[in-house]
Image (tube, rainbow, N blue to C red):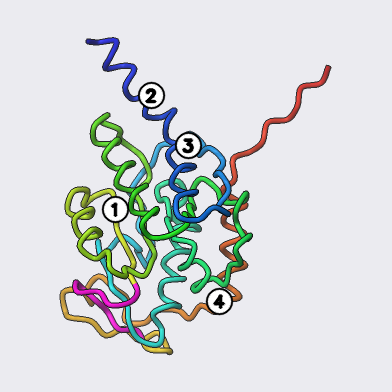
Amino acid sequence: MLLLGLLLPAVAAIGYPMRRRIYAMAGASFISPLPPPAERKASFTYRPAIDPFAVPLLGLSGGGASATARVFTLIALEELGNTALVVIPRPDATVLFGLAEDDLLDETGANLFIPGNLDAALAYMETELAIRRNTGTTGAPRLLLVADGGTETDRIEELQGRHPEEFAAVLLGDWPGESASVDEDGLVQAPPALAAALPERLPAMSRTEARDRLNAAAQRHQPTPRRPRRR
């Protein structure tokens, strides 16, 4: 029994890259396999001025909703480092960041995952979070979903309810839960309880600037390739 207890976390760790490859290819045949994530332990002590995890499930509407989603995505990638893994379905990455179908296929790093569609994204997160719980994994990056919730609102709420400390979402489109309206100038309007967790005004973020920063963040988090040994 002791040996089995030691082997389970190791098996889960080995299977982590394979799970991401499987769900990246689900629903979109042009998605290439992701590189294996670097080994790291997460620390949740740092909180940026704008915290993408401050509201577990945050719906966004208004003329500044897309810019806000871009800002939250880049804060998670640039400031939270190894403590966050951002998951953006390919259609949402195309709308928010102007990515083409062949952008960020091989370059997607350990902190950014772009599966083929929302179903593939949720299937990956459901599996990943369940395995973490079953194996007692600690210190793994929190998952941040950035997407249009579409018809999967119940599924997203159920997932957050099962893993409240490990998963959050920034959701566009019609969202029945907590929602904030952001105008084109970045001014935020929200119910009092929600407004307390958000800044009064959010910075603007054009799609062109966001795409450049997303590319830079993905390349920065790439696992360092091993140099070939000299003979």
Label 2 sits on what residue type? Answer: Val
Q: Going 40% across and 37% down the picture, which residue do you hit? A: 41
Please tell me whether residue 123 is drawn above or below residue 200 in the rendered image: above
Quadrant in the picture for residue 34: top right
Magenta span includes 188: no
Find residue 104 and report its horizontal and vertical position in percent: 60, 57
* Mark nearer the N terminus (2 vs 1): 2
Q: Earlier in the sequence, mark 1 or mark 4?
A: 1
The foreground one among 151 and 75 is 151
Which span of residues is magenta-colored? 172-182
Residue 129 lies, in percent from the top left, at 29, 42
Picture quadrant of residue 55: bottom left
Report whether 175 appears left or right of 94.
left
Please tell me how crowded label 3 is: few (under 14), some (14-19), or many (20+) other residues with Cα within 10 Å: some
- Residue type at mark 1 is Phe
Q: Which residue is mark 1?
A: 167
Task: Identify residue for label 3.
Answer: 17
Reading the image, the residue beneath label 4 is 207
Badge 2 is on which residue? 11
Q: CA distance from mark 3 to mark 2?
A: 11 Å
